[in-house]
Amino acid sequence: MDPEVPVLSVIELGIIRDVEIDAGGVTVVVTPTYSGCPAMKVIEDDIVSALHAGGIAEARVRTVFTPAWTTDWIPESARKKLIAYGIAAPGHSGVHSPVQLRRREAVLCPFCGSANTSLRSEFGSTACKALHYCNACTQPFEEFKSI
Amino acid sequence: MVELPKGDFGYTIVRQFLFSTYAMHQWEALTLSTDTDLSGIAAKALKESRYHVRHSAEWVVRLGDGTDDSHGRAQDALDDLWRYTGELFMTDDIEQALVQEQLAVDSSSLFAPWKRDVTDVIARATLRLPADAYMQRGGRIGRHTEHLGVMLAEMQVLPRTHPGAKW
């Protein structure tokens, strides 16, 4: 589980890129979400602990950067879990013009589903989230940003 | 430029915009590096730096095209910071050697796309682009502002106070 978003597993986040099994043990190949995300270390430790608990003594985590992680790898089922948890799901990352002012797509409120929402801050409680406000149900909420 | 004190919000934002726009183009060019670690990190960093550019560019427009006070402060910041932008595009022999091996980017090649983006946002912010006059230089050969000393002291205070500290 992601410690900051405890409804998504590492599989659902799309950060497990490969699992290598050989005589020397098991290596889980992981790609980081955001550079500098403090949850990555916890996630790596949790993966190793889970493998140990499963009886695999030689467990390792290897980090790869290519291809770069994108929120497009989060499946629809996991997006529903995010919304149920109260976090707006990321839109599709797409290709942006060099300097894009204002995003085009509306961010839907995870509580009432309204599109009548406004951005309050590009940075929320973690680097991967933005803070919005729902004008319909007057609730502030966070959005998992698309990258 | 990045070792200067924060200043007011206008100063912080204008600097963030000038630098993030530079970083975005640098990362974009580095995605073509022959070093796969570097190109991988660049592809990742590029996505995040686009976000930084959007965030700071929106604020530059908001401040520049805002009240008389916010416009004035943003213009003062731009005028103050401009002399530090020239150095971003200066290259040297070490960089050129890396460029020859297609590992790094020629910093001077980043100027045209940077200037295009900056000019566009500055115009939308109703701010005035400063003239290219005297430019600070010397960062690459170790000439820094006095502010770097304070920053280094701040970053070193913990290990110096508690040698061997771990957490």
Image (cartoon, coloured by chain):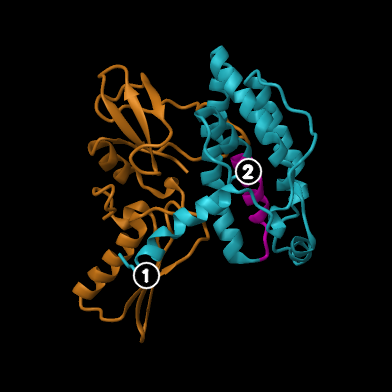
Chain colours: A orange, B cyan
What chain does mark 1 sit on? B
Image spot of residue B63 (x, y percent): 55, 21
Image spot of residue A144 (x, y percent): 37, 40
Please say if A52 is above or below B69.
below
Please say if B31 is above or below B15.
below
**Side (left or right) of A26 relative to A112:** right
Image spot of residue A61 (x, y percent): 37, 70
**Side (left or right) of B91 relative to A105:** right
Q: Quadrant of the N terminus of chain B?
A: top right
Magenta segment's dominant SS is helix
The residue drawn where x is 45% and y is 53% is: B154
Q: Which residue is mark 2?
A: B1
Q: Earlier in the sequence, mark 2 or mark 1?
A: 2
* Residue A57 found in image quarter: bottom left
The residue drawn where x is 60% and y is 65% is: B36
What chain does mark 2 sit on? B
The residue drawn where x is 37% and y is 63% is: B161
Front residue of B108 and A22 = B108
Please say if A83 is above or below A31.
above
- Under tag 1, what secondary structure? loop
Magenta stretch in the rendered image: B19-34
Please indicate, yes or no, whether residue B5 appears anywhere in the rendered image.
Answer: yes
Front residue of B69 and A130 = B69
The kind of residue tagged 2 is Met
* Residue B34 found in image quarter: bottom right
**Side (left or right) of B71 relative to A109:** right
Inter-mark Cα distance, 2 to 1: 31 Å
The residue mark sitting in front, 2 or 1, is 1
Decide: marks 2, 1 in contact (CB < 8 A)? Answer: no
Q: Which residue is mark 1?
A: B163
